[in-house]
Image (spheres, rainbow, N blue to C red):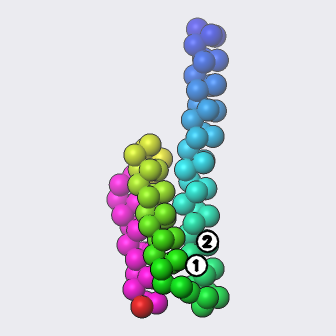
Amino acid sequence: MKKKNKHIILKNRRNKILNNRYKTTFKNLKILIINKIKLENINYDNFKLLLNKYYSAIDKAVKKNVLKSNNASRKKSKMFKLYKNIN
């Protein structure tokens, strides 16, 4: 029983590291996008590329069960509203 518990603890640590990688990716992209909006240093082509990277990072997090699908769609729609307000 001890061996199994040790294995479970190690697996949880590994998964936590992987999950945090997905979370920090889209959080950092969100911060980058919001800072670009605040600085008003916006090139629409670059902004669209950042938005696509943000969407793909969120989709990967959903695929790996780090985020739930409704939470992901809510985050995407908030970011798209910011994009619409700029245009």
Residue 84 locus on image (x, y percent):
39, 86
Say which mark, if any, is on residue 31. 2
Crowding at mark 2 (Cα within 10 Å: few <14, some 14-19, many 20+): few
Give the residue at x 54% y 60%.
26
Q: Are marks 2 and 1 in contact (CB under 8 Å)?
A: yes
- Numbered range of the magenta stretch: 68-86
Give the residue at x 43% y 63%.
55
Q: Nearer the viewer, residue 50 or 1?
A: 50
Quadrant including the C terminus? bottom left
Choose top left, top right, bottom left or bottom right for residue 80: bottom left
Residue 36 locus on image (x, y percent):
60, 81
Residue 78 locus on image (x, y percent):
42, 75
Q: Please say if 86 is above or below 29.
A: below
Under mark 2, the amino acid is: Ile
Q: Nearer the viewer, residue 7 or 76?
A: 76
Horizontal placement of 63 versus 50: left or right? left
| Residue position marked by numbered label 1 in the rendering | 34
- SS at circle 2: helix
Residue 74 locus on image (x, y percent):
39, 67
Task: Please say whether residue 80 is one of the residues in the magenta stretch.
Answer: yes
Q: Please say if 48 is above or below 8.
A: below
Q: Please say if 87 is above or below 22.
A: below
Say which mark, if any, is on residue 18. none
Choose top left, top right, bottom left or bottom right for residue 71: bottom left
Q: Main secondary structure of the magenta part?
A: helix
Give the residue at x 64% y 17%.
6
Task: Please say whether residue 78 is one of the residues in the magenta stretch.
Answer: yes
Give the residue at x 46% y 90%.
86
- SS at circle 1: helix
Crowding at mark 1 (Cα within 10 Å: few <14, some 14-19, many 20+): some
Under mark 1, the amino acid is: Ile
